[in-house]
Image (cartoon, grey):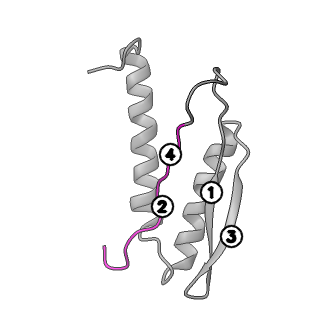
Amino acid sequence: MHGEGMSAIQNDLITGHLKRHVTTLANDIGQRHVNAPHALHKAANYISDEWDAMGYQVEPQTFSAKGVRCLNLEIQRAGSDANAAAILVVANYDTGKDC
């Protein structure tokens, strides 16, 4: 089923991008947590670089967890209707230690 107004080609492109991101994060980078800080930082850099390539300015928010420097990554996208409600999307990019 395609999104309203979305062509099969657009759907295939989106599906391909999502598969590439999942493969990179799950297979190439692997588990990401404070006991694997290199992978955690590599994932943050990957996500930041992808958003940057799409023209977004990434605002990192640094914090410490178990002595490891961690990042929350934030981007904003202004809507076309200033009177419309805001939408907040939140996602984790770390994984559980024993996943």
Name which residue type carries label 2: Tyr
Secondary structure under badge 4?
loop
Secondary structure under badge 1?
strand
Cα–Cα gap, marks 1 and 2: 10 Å
Label placed on residue 89 = 4
Residue 50 or residue 57, whichever sits in front: 57
Residue 96 lies, in percent from the top left, at 37, 73
Say whether marks 1 and 4 touch (CB < 8 Å). no
Say whether marks 3 and 1 touch (CB < 8 Å). no
Residue numbers of the magenta segment: 87-99
Cα–Cα gap, marks 4 and 2: 13 Å
Nearest-to-viewer mark from 4 and 2 = 4
Which of disc 4 and disc 1 is earlier in sequence? 1
Say whether marks 1 and 2 touch (CB < 8 Å). yes
Mark 4 Cα-neighbour bin, 10 Å: few <14, some 14–19, many ≥20 = few
Residue labelled with disc 3:
62
Cα–Cα gap, marks 2 and 3: 14 Å
Q: Check the picture and name the quadrant holding the N terminus.
A: top left
Name the magenta segment's main secondary structure.
loop
Residue labelled with disc 1:
73
Residue labelled with disc 2:
93
Which of disc 4 and disc 3 is earlier in sequence? 3
Secondary structure under badge 2?
loop
Name the side, left or right, on which 15 lies relative to 43.
Answer: left
